Image (spheres, rainbow, N blue to C red):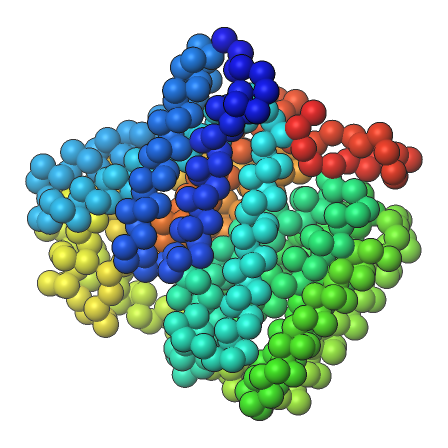
Amino acid sequence: MADAPGRFGEVSSRGSLYILFTALLVGTLWSGGYFPAPKWTLLTMLLAAAVWELAVTARRGRLWSLGSPALLLMGAFTLFAAASCLWSVSPDDSLRQSLLLLGYLGVLVVIRGQLDRDGGNAGTVAMWLVYVAAFVSAWGIATYVYRLPPYAFFLDDIYRAGSTFEYSNALSCFVLMALPVTSALMAVSGRRDRPLYAAATAIMVTAAVLTFSRLGMVMLAALAIYMPVSLWRRGLALVETAAIVSGLVTAALAVGLAGAGRETAALVMAVSGAAAAWLAGRYLPRSSGAMQAKAAASLALAGAVLAAVLVKLSDSAVYILTQRVRHGFTPAKLLPHRLDTFDGAVEAFRTHPLAGSGIGTFAEVYRRYSIATYTKFAHNLVLQAAVDTGLAGALLLTLFLVYVLVLAAWRLLARGGPLARAFAVASLVFLAYNMVDWEWYVPSLAAWFMAGVAVMEMNAVDGGENDDVQVDKGEDVGAGRERVGPA
């Protein structure tokens, strides 16, 4: 049955999306990594959005459209995790974690239902992610420059940006998830919107550098190649390269000036970097062929040289880089704390190998086998799931993660619209982080990840027809301009 026409019909149809976006905003801005009281706020809103979506979808007689491998596999893991409350060493912790997993399922339900009704909502999801990430990045830059706790903090003998997550690696993961989506929106946007996405790119690149996450640095380098290449056919590789270079140069300036006690000058330089990227998006024309290749390569080289010179002139920057890479790049040197944590987690797993000690109880069990400094997380998602839910739960979660990995590879290598490919890259970033860190346990990050999985799946189901974009009949028609939005 169709929704009622008019404003009430639109609110009824999209109400679950409004609630979900509000939940994601609250979850990302309000101490996303530690979430004391607001965790229940986020959970309640996620579940409310899911119930709303189920009601609307049932009214339309399309409940079958919500089914998917991701929902089935994640649902099976959630069901087993909830059952572990019966034998958990800490039933209250297991109940809380089970409900949060149910909230993640709710994200899949809402996004799948919305995309089933309106493919243009994938563009809405992408824009919301970029807007939130740009704000969080700007907040992280400003608080890093002025050394404002808890958003910036002293860790590993250096100051690092954490923004609203209060944890630098979580900020790095979130920003790196948003960057390819920003690039995709630039690809499908018109000339008037392109400068905004260019500026957002520069801001996010700056914030990613200021987290000084070692894995983040490697991934940022990979994205700095991937994003211009992904825009090559659209003639925007030069614009994207200019935005990335602006972010890198701004980061180098921010580190040097903030370290020298010139905070206001550092903030002005950060704003100037975003403005430079905006101007590049506004005035650099579309280009193609050999000219684009030469211009982009020259700009990238010039930017790298300039950033290197700025770093060399800054004692703070040199010290920070020395601290982050002084151990080399072998796992035993880069991950000494994590390797010890893995060993302790394996010992904890052996006490309850089949069914685990109960979802959400890792911190309780691990303390008995702690080898390194005590931590609440195994810094490996599958290993922590094995401790919490045993072989059975770890297998179910692994099946879900492998499915997402294969789906992301399919979207990238075989077929997929710009936003589906962008969320595929974002999903790969999230998965990589969770092999050596604990971003899965940052509620808003896991929820954004689920939203991206749903976008990828709906594109696969629709065979590329539900591609979030349409050709704009106005300006730039000759250039094949596209814009995000419902058809």
Up-down relation of residue 232 to residue 312 (above or below): above
Q: Position of residue 346 (x, y in %)?
A: 20, 55
**Residue at x 18% of width, y 42% of height:** 95
Q: Is residue 473 above or below residue 145?
A: above
Q: Is residue 337 above or below residue 76?
A: below
Pick the front one: 312 or 94: 94
For the point 60% across and 26% down, the residue is 119
Quarter-of-image position of residue 203: bottom right
Q: Quadrant of residue 86?
A: top left
Counting every numbered tag in the picture gives: 0
Name the image quarter holding the C terminus.
Answer: top right
In the rendered structure, the answer to whether residue 337 lies left or right of residue 262 reads left
Q: Nearer the viewer, residue 252 or 136?
A: 136
Does 1 appear above or below 178? above
Q: Is residue 243 left or right of residue 126?
A: right
Residue 51, position as x, y percentages in the image: 35, 27
In this rendered view, identify the residue nearer to me: 95 or 164: 164
Whether residue 379 is visible, yes or no, is no
Residue 333 showing in the rendered view: yes
Of 427 and 382, the residue lying toward us: 427
The answer to whether 230 appears left or right of 258 in the picture is right
Q: Position of residue 34 (x, y in %)?
A: 32, 60
Q: Residue at x 56, y 59 (%)?
A: 135
